[in-house]
Amino acid sequence: MRLYQRRARQIGAAVIVVGLVVLVAWSFAISWYPSPKSYPFQGPSVSAANGVIEWPVIRGGGASFAYLTATIGADTRDPMFAANWSDVYAAGLRRGAIHVYSLCRLAADQANRFNTTVPYTEDSLPPAIVIDFEPGCAARPERDVVIGEIERLIATIETHMRKPVLLKVSRRFDTAYRVTAAIERPIWSVQNFFPPDYAARPWRMWQASDMRRIDGAPTMVHWNVVAP
């Protein structure tokens, strides 16, 4: 009986220790961001899923810019884009717009959706195109088709925004289609905590965390830094 009780206490103590370790690790992970000394220009990328954001508070937390989801595929406008676009500017932050690419829709239709949603402003950051395998789209065209469609999308958006686009390409998509090797545009790479090296060229921007907690945002946000 005593042996059983001793083992039970040992197991209970071990569970508590493990729980504390997990809690400390989680707390560190959601509060971590790259050193501003190494990466002076940092900021979130958000969508309507992040809720209503207090942009002056975000700026006070060290952000110098924000990227805002504007459109998804050819059919969807982010319902918070217009408000975020205005509020980010009012807070004194630089702002950029994001289009989420879909393999299931024509580039011309997607570009039209973006260009009729995002106004041209001379002071905006380069527009970004998020390129990944989206849920609900099973299409997997040949590489030449995909590269051609992305190039058409880029050309039309760049004509409207008058700036080269930024390509945010996931590791798995780049492995499948080698987009960063085929299209010479600045790269926005993605990897939590450690600088990524999967793209064919050095990244210009890095999504360093997809789980940062910061005052002013009701949910965790994606946190990004610009290459020094």
Image (cartoon, helix red, strand yellow):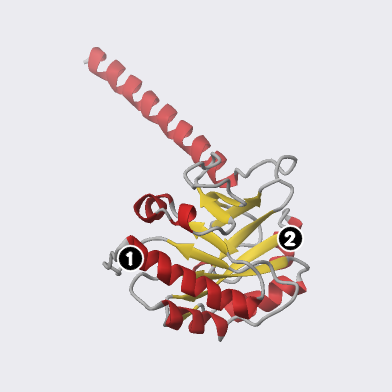
The three-letter amino acid code for the residue at tag 2 is: Arg
Q: Could you tell me which quadrant the N terminus lies in? A: top left
Secondary structure at badge 1 equals loop
Q: Is residue 84 visible?
A: yes
Q: Is residue 128 above or below residue 157?
A: above
Q: Residue furthest bottom?
A: 116
- Kind of residue sitting beneath label 1: Pro
Is residue 114 toward the left or the right of residue 33 in the image? left
For the residue pair 224 and 90, the one nearer the viewer reads as: 224
Name the residue: 49% across, 47% down. 199
In this view, the residue in front, 6 or 119, is: 119
Mark 2 = which residue?
59
Q: CA distance from mark 2 to mark 1?
A: 32 Å
- Disc 1: which residue: 135
Q: Earlier in the sequence, mark 2 or mark 1?
A: 2
Residue 64 is tagged as none
Image location of residue 128, percent across then percent down: 57, 66
Q: Say few, some or many: other residues with alpha carbon within 10 Å of mark 1 (under 14 / 14 to 19 / 20 or more).
A: few
